Amino acid sequence: MNPSPRLKRAYVETYGCQMNISDGELMEGILADGGYEIVRAPEDADVVLVNTCAIREHAERRVLGRVSQLNGLKLERPDLLIGVTGCMAQRLGETLLEQAPYVDLVMGPDGYRGLPEALARLERGEDVDHAALGAAETEDAAEGVVLIHGRKRGPQLAVLALDMDENYQGLEQRRADGPAAWVPIQRGCDHRCTYCIVPYVRGGEKNRSAVEILSEVRGLAEQGVSEVTLLGQTVNSYVWKDVDFPSLLRDVARIDGIGRVRFTSPHPNDVTERLVEVMAEETGVCEQLHLPAQSGDDRTLRRMLRRYTVESLLEKIELVRTAIPDIALSTDIIVAFPGETDAEFRATLGLMREVRFDEAFTYKYSLREGTPATRLPAEDFIDSDEAQSRLAELIEVTRAIQSEINEAELGRIEEVLIENRGRDEGQIRGRTRRNKVVVFDGDASRIGQYARTMLDRTTGATFVGTEVGAHAAVEG
Ligand code: SAH
Ligand code: SF4
Ligand code: F3S
């Protein structure tokens, strides 16, 4: 008789946005269901999956470096399977298998349901036919599954079908322990911002059933989660049957045990009066909004196909600030979009000075093959020194504003949800409702609880505080 085989071990390493991190948790859930033990280091694993991002070239280069580093493990253990999943896997597809022959599997964001089966087949070194690989069952999808033969050991497999029906209904994520959880409510994106790769690697907008989302959040609350962040590329365009985003948000905020609700990323055009009303009325919805502006110049916004003007963006911000005066706002900005003039860049600086965002995530435009902006005239592309100097100037302006805002908050007493240990022994850290990080003295046994904390000092971006008393359990 054969001894019973030990559990296969899988390791998932994720890059990119919260949606992708949440997908990493989904993959862990699927693998655990498929009989894998999830391990925390590639050295301990039989299967290593690198879950990648394609948003900018820099992000991709970093991950490619990491994948080739993991090949070092495979040289010691030829049986190790290496898979690349996520947005870069979808973008590069079979090219990646050709360029990195030690990669066994590339799988895009709609293929994860079929992950255990794909791995089992690769392990057996068996020829893989198109059918029966989860998402790859439809005719259209079958075209996305390709086998490349001719390697020394076993076949390579690419699962690249985008599937408009796949929203992973019925599957459970395997979340990291902690009081805060991400809940994807939408996948894909129906916009076509001309710089952006996301619609091409994740397909069109797909919304999950509201019934399922609410029952998932109830389950999380029962397990002790008290903060949820609803996720989607344009999260506030969510609609399922007669449930739109404001009503979903209201329902989530009213679930017992959920003390805090956030959502990201909303599109400015779907910030409606009704949404703002729900945000203002529901005590569970945090006083925080991430509102990606991308640029402060109308011509650039038009060429980015953002579908709003600076004026309409400012109106939305006014609407939000009137209803929720204390709201913390953050944004995303791209500098040096092809054709952006110096004056147009300065208009973006003007927007930053006018709005005074609490935080800004700032990026240099990065060319993404296949996106509409690549077809702009060659002379429009801005050289990297100029782009770098615009970015540096923008960062300086936004940091100065952030410091001023945060210094003005010193002395405030804020509710902090304690999420993890601080860097130093004896310290813990968490976030305020306005999404600001606070570090203070306290025992790690407090993780998951709320504290009332005085903001004493700021480094510019984060705070050092003192606890001024435990906070009563927050009821949803
Ligand atoms: N769906 C979200 C975010 C998408 S990606 C939204 O619409 O807000 C996150 C951020 O990356 C974007 O907001 C944008 O600022 C930036 N980004 C996207 N594509 C980029 C590119 N090609 N070059 C530089 N930054 C980019
Ligand atoms: Fe990309 Fe625009 Fe969609 Fe955001 S809204 S994911 S920037 S295409
Ligand atoms: Fe990156 Fe994909 Fe997210 S490209 S930003 S991981 S949706």
Image: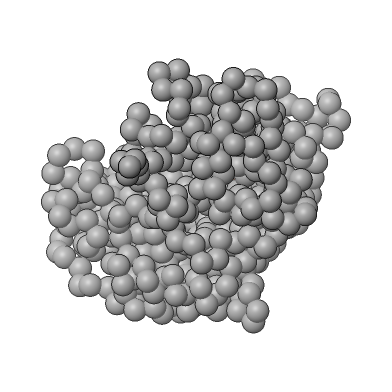
240 to the left or right of 450? right
Q: In which quarter of the image is the N terminus?
A: top left
On screen, residue 460 versus residue 116, left or right, reads left
| In the rendered image, the vertical position of residue 74 relative to residue 321, given as above or below | above
**Above or below for 132 versus 186:** above
In the rendered view, does 468 fall on the left or right side of 326? left
| In the displayed structure image, the side of residue 95 where residue 465 appears, left or right | left
Who's the residue at 56% across and 61% down the image?
168
Residue placed most toward the observer, 4 or 367: 4
Rendered image quadrant of residue 223: bottom left
Q: Give the residue furthest to the front.
A: 1
Going 47% across and 79% down the picture, which residue do you hit? 251
Q: Residue 231's x, y, as percent?
A: 52, 59
Res. 163 in view: yes
Can you give x and y, in whole percent of width and height, for residue 204 in the image?
Answer: 71, 57
**In the figure, residue 43 lies in which quadrant?**
top left
All told, the count of numbered labels is 0
Task: Residue 414 in the image: state x and y as whole percent.
Answer: 28, 61
On the question of residue 364 being in view, the answer is no
Residue at 55 percent across and 66 percent down: it is 169
